[in-house]
Amino acid sequence: MKIIAIFFVTLAITLVLDTDHAKGQSEESHNTAHGKRLWLKYNCFACHGTDGHGGGAGPKIAPHPIALAAFVAIVRHPRQSNMPMFSSKLLPDEDLRDIWIYMKTIPENPLPASIPLLEDR
């Protein structure tokens, strides 16, 4: 009898945790997709590259962006004169957080040795 009770308690806990985990994943993927749309909408790619790895007037900011608070501060009051300032009216903090989440999901560039086309023949 105790074994059955333990089984059902364990099963219930597992179901609750899996539901919370799945909810967190769907919210995170929504934030990532929204962040990508904003990245394109605000033309961030024009200076920071399509994948945030730099390549223009802006520095590399992905896949390991700076801390969120620092990211927000720089976007609100850029150090470089060529970066436009994005006020919280134009780009709310929640949207800026989604862009930051998107930056965290971008993978590293592959090493040249891992690209078959670049292998020595």
Image (spheres, rainbow, N blue to C red):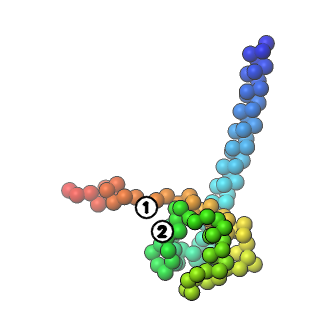
Residue in the picture at 78% in, 15% down:
2
Q: Are marks 2 and 1 in contact (CB under 8 Å)?
A: yes
Judge whether residue 114 can be spotted in this image.
yes
Q: Residue furthest bottom?
A: 81
Q: CA distance from mark 2 to mark 1?
A: 8 Å
Viewer-proximal residue among 70 and 56:
70
Q: Which residue is mark 1?
A: 109
Amino acid found under the numbered disc labelled 2: His
Residue 76 location in percent, x, y?
67, 78
105 sits to left or right of 89: left
In the image, is residue 27 above or below residue 66?
A: above
Q: Residues within 10 Å of mark 2 (few under 14, many from 20)?
A: many
In the picture, which quadrant includes the N terminus? Answer: top right
Q: Which mark is residue 53?
A: 2
Look at 73% across and 22% down and name the residue there.
Answer: 7
**Looking at the rendering, which quadrant does residue 30 occupy?**
bottom right
| Quadrant position of the C terminus in the picture | bottom left
